[in-house]
Amino acid sequence: MNLVWFKITDLRLRDHEALKKAFNKTPNVLLVFCLDPRFNQNMKFGEKKFSDFKLKFLYQSVLDLHTQIKKNGGHLNIYFDTPENIIPKLVNKYEIKKIFHIRDTTDEELKQLNIIKEKVADQAKIKDYWGNTVYHIDDLNYPIDKIPFVFSNFRKSLSINKIREEQNIKLIRLQKCTQDVDNINQLIKLNDKLNVPMKFKGGETEAWQRLNYYFYQKKLLSNYKKTRNGLLGKDYSSKFSPYLAFGNISGKSIQLEVFKYENEIEKNVSTYWLYFELIWRDFFRFSSIKYGNSMFKLKGIKNKMLDWRNNNDEETNKLFNKWKYGKTGYPYIDANMLELRKTGFMSNRGRQMVASFLIKDLKIDWRRGAEYFESMLIDHDVASNYGNWNYAAGIGADPRENRYFNVYKQAYTYDRSCKFILNWIPELKGQDKKDIINVKNLNYYQPIVNIKNNY
Ligand code: FAD
């Protein structure tokens, strides 16, 4: 019997090579997902690994996967323990010979895999497959340790013709699934109990609905480049990131749909731009293999020490909490942080701004910000999150030294009408919009740091 190990990053049926291969020439397959109790633990700086938003998105994704498998006559076994405990036991119980999974690239996940490998070494082989990105790792023109340091060189090294076809299982084969446990009611209960207002619902079904809406129903893809820097609402950007993060859809599947859209509807700079952004994600994912744990260190992948506040100072904690809870006295920063706190999402514009503020204006250890994002974001992706924070701190892949986002300029450029700010901070309604942008004469929190207004 074979075993397929679904993880939190590949919760789908479509374009899942490990799933497809596991059903080749074999009588029975055990499909396994482990809801790891460590998701509820705190991380290095004290943030919970999974906020309620993230947890809800995960539950919804697993529930949808369970339903889709069941519809096709199969069964997903759900366990409430760590994969390191569960998988070796299953290997023994069912004399599993091969474990199929989609390859991860970062430390925690690799350590977990190694423990399982050691525990089952005499009994089962681990078969890993590449998935989730647009490009296959074997189609890069160089060994992974030679991946270019900056994004533009990476982009130029890619050939659009090399994007592979989807790897789809014949769904009828799911009938060969074996049932070990049926814990679905436990998961339904957990999900029902978690009462959080979700802007987006998790799951493969929802991922494809979102794609159909964004591409074909509304043709929003045709204007993506013009709208992508927006702040308010669902449609200024694709919002594919949460589905990608939980693997409800693969980067490759999205890109193949972009090609289809270009053939059938329209090909323009916006359709290209979605590809451009998707390969940023590939870039961080591939780079995470090369740079390993340096991505999580204070000096980052550039191994560069900057002038940081002491993490143990009370003042540092006070400032960090003002940032985290949206009480910095800068309405544009606070609105973004409130959005994150109330929805588990923030726009790309917002993320760049609040990261720069924490790092460059407050001089607070970027890893605390990254950890807070890791906890809160429904689209948290290890490589994209830590890669972008490295970049924002000037210790990552940014070829420009000292990139800085000025809060007045950003607010003026992207939210001159204060629509976004007032949406999240309605208390400011009635105050002069110019004053809100310039943070002047406001009946609001005192700014926690003095930033020059040169704009
Ligand atoms: P769209 O603009 O529609 O872009 C389409 C897709 O391209 C996205 O879904 C995403 O997969 C990819 N993409 C776009 N920009 C980036 C980028 N800069 N880096 C990597 N991929 C990108 N993205 C995550 O998916 N997970 C994270 O944990 C994450 N953390 C971030 C932290 C910081 C400090 C910053 C500045 C950015 C971070 N991003 C992260 C990147 C980006 O902000 C989000 O991917 C984007 O806002 C998601 O919204 P969307 O799907 O509507 O994006």
Image: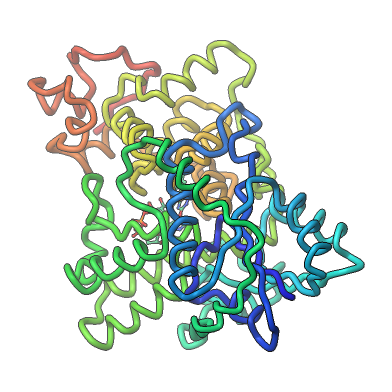
Residue 285 position in % (x across, y down): 58, 61
Scheme of image coloration: rainbow
Could you say which is closer to the camera, residue 218 or residue 53? 53
Residue 333 position in % (x across, y down): 33, 30
| Residue ID at (43%, 52%) | 60
Q: Classify residue 243 as left or right of residue 11.
A: left
- For residue 345, above or below residue 234: above
- For residue 371, above or below residue 15: above
Image quadrant for the N terminus? bottom right
Could you say which is closer to the camera, residue 87 or residue 144? 87
| Residue ID at (80%, 62%) | 93
Q: Classify residue 246 as left or right of residue 336.
A: right
Image quadrant for the C terminus? top left
Quadrant of residue 276 within the rendered picture:
bottom left
Q: Is residue 180 visible?
A: yes
Residue 133 position in % (x across, y down): 52, 69
- For residue 26, above or below residue 300: below
Quadrant of residue 17 within the rendered picture:
bottom right
Q: Is residue 403 visible?
A: no
Residue 160 position in % (x across, y down): 46, 83
Q: How many marks?
A: 0
Could you say which is closer to the camera, residue 234 or residue 330? 234
| Residue ID at (31%, 84%) | 260
- For residue 193, above or below residue 205: above
| Residue ID at (76%, 51%) | 84
Quadrant in which ligand 1 is drawn: bottom left
